Structure formats: C-alpha cells, structure tokens
Amino acid sequence: MESIEAVLDLDKKRADIAVLEEQAAAPSLWDDPEAAQKITSRLSHLQSEVRRTEALRGRIDDLEVMFELAEDEGDAEARAEAETELDSVRKALDEMEVRTLLSGEYDEREALVNVRAEAGGVDAADFAEQLQRMYLRWAERHGYSTEVYETSYAEEAGIKSSTFVVKAPYAYGTLSVEQGTHRLVRISPFDNQGRRQTSFAGVEVLPVVEQSDHVEIDESELRVDVYRASGPGGQGVNTTDSAVRITHLPTGIVVSCQNERSQIQNKASAMNVLQAKLLERRRQEEQAKMDALKGDGGNSWGNQMRSYVLHPYQMVKDLRTGHEVGNPQGVLDGEIDGFLEAGIRWRKQQEQ
C-alpha cells in the first residue's frame, strides 16, 4: 500500500484538486463548455482516486483491529470474517497496483476500439461480433458508458467491423493490451458437416483525441462519401443518406460512422476516429524512431495474442502472458479483468 501511495503521489493530487476546485467555482466556468467539461471531469476523476486510496488505507488499518479482537475473544466467526475481508482487500490492492502501472503518455484517455473479422469467413464475422459484445459487456460490468460509432454487418451472420468508444478514465491504458489478433477454435454452427473451424478477428485500440493533440488534417486531402446506413436499425436510420465515410488520401485510412441520424453528427464522429488513427500513426512512427535508436528492432507484441478454444476442450489462453481460464463463455460475457491485469503487468516487464 505504501508503494502504491508513493507512486500515486496523493499530496500532489490533493494540490491539483484544490486548484481545480477553485477553477470549477469560477462564475465564468461555463462560458467555455468544453473547457468546463474538462475541468469538472478531471476534478471528479482525481477526487474519486484519492477517495478510493484513502478508503483502502482505512480498510487495511481496520484489518489489524479485526484480527486482534477475534484473537482476544477467541471468536472463530469473527476470525473468518476478518479472513474474508483480508482476501477482499488483497484483491482491491492488486487492482489498484495495476492502475499505477498505467503511466504511458495516453493511458489516462478514453479508448476507441475497432473490432474486425479476419480469416475464417462467416465464422470470423460471428467471432468479431462476439468480441464486440465481450468488450461492451466488460464496460457495462464496470459502469462505463460506451457509444458505437459504426457497425458494418456481414451478409450471413456477425459483423465485418465495428468501431466504438469506451468513456472512462484509463480505458485506453487498460484496453490497449487487447490489441492484436484473437483466434477462435470451435465446431462451426455454420458448417452442416459439424467440422471444427479456426477463425480470426483483429482488435485495434486507440486513445481518444483531445484538443491538445494538434493533429493537422488538410480538408483537401479528404474524400467524403455519404451513403445509406445498412443493417438492423430503428425507424429512419436506413431511409436517408446520413452515413458518412471519410478517406484520408495521403495514408489511405478509411473511417465511417452511421450511428447518428444527422450527416453532420456522423461526419464529426468520423473525423474524431480519423484523428485518433492519425495520432496513433504518429505515435508509432515516433516509437519506431526510438526503437531504431535503441537498436531493438521494435519487436511487436501485437499479432496473435489470445486463443479461445471451445472444442475439443474449453479454454481461453493469452499467448503472451500465459494467463488462462477454463470458462470461455464467462470470458466472452465480459469477464476479462484477469487477462487485462496480466497483460498490463506483462507489458510493464517488457518495457524494463
């Protein structure tokens, strides 16, 4: 706990809170709604982090008293209660320690996630849809809000691709370890001969762009196409040309958005996605230069990173960390915290 408190630097956080509280109390705060939103959001995040740390410190201090009382009174029930609380505190401490490992430049940001079907035909499209649901369920379990920007449905089943944002502090730092190729092995429900199939889906995780990022985009280098949204939708969503596809000509990056009824709103969301992709491209180029200077060739930890086996046995295994569980259905239902924690610890070791 002491090492976590040292890394989090609570005194600095309390000083930052005092400054932000002063700014939040200014009568002119909402003259600039975007700046106001940033101030109040940052304030709320710092306050909750300090409260969570102080509460955990209080629970650790109380533990000693709980064990002493149980010992003095020879109360087996109180002793069992103290043991249960000790396990709970250990788990909370592990989670907080993982948060202290998220110290990258963009780790505090919200996350923009893109899931796409790769090799494997209809099974891959179905798998991509399962992965999209897995991440959305994970966010839901933690109380994080999400927004789906675009979903491209496959013809027979599943999706070709989907882009969505997870709106929570440190969502990017946490989910970025999911980037790479995921592999599914199962008896295909789409194969009338009941054969085992292997299919692949790719996951890309980007930090959400902020005003301070300065990603310059020349409008003349963009091709903007509008089209009619496809796939399941409410009334009106498929009846107007409101969906927007933007192609960035110099890089060939293509982004699209179709979740809003308004073409203007869809274009704004698509531009946000394009900026995030260009920011990530710039970050990768800078990283490649650093790797070249360090002479390590920039060994990538992306590519194939997790296997989901449903047949002939049941297992999900991370190929980088070795973390595995025997409950694929639970994982696909959003129970991925163990994989995220192992991935974050593994990445930190790679950086040392």
Image: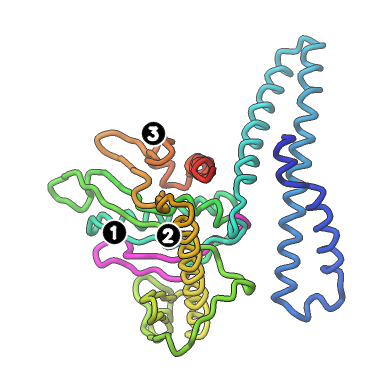
What element does badge 2 sit on? strand
Alpha carbon separation for disc pair 3 and 2: 25 Å
Q: Main secondary structure of the magenta part?
A: strand
- Quarter of image, res 257: bottom left
The residues colored magenta run 149-170
Looking at the image, tell me whether mark 2 or mark 1 is earlier in sequence order: 1
Residue drawn at 35 percent across, 36 percent down: 315
Which residue reaches farthest bottom? 220
Q: Is residue 144 visible?
A: no
Above or below, comparing residue 346 to residue 172 in the picture: above
Mark 2 in CB contact with mark 1 (< 8 angstroms): no
Residue 161, quarter of picture: bottom left
Q: Which mark is residue 118?
A: 1
Q: Residue 17 at what x, y percent from top left?
A: 81, 58
How does the figure colour the protein chain or chains?
Answer: rainbow
Left or right: residue 232 compared with residue 172: left
Where disc 1 sits, the SS reads loop
Location of residue 130 with respect to 263 vertically, above or below: above
- Tally of numbered tags: 3
Mark 1 residue crowding within 10 angstroms, few (<14) / some (14–19) / many (20+):
many
Q: What amino acid is at disc 2?
A: Glu
Residue designated by label 2 = 204
Amino acid carrying label 3: it is Gly
The residue that disc 3 covers is: 326
Q: CA distance from mark 3 to mark 1?
A: 25 Å
Tell me if 177 is positioned left or right of 26 in this view: left
User: Could you say which disc has been placed on residue 312 in the image?
Assistant: none
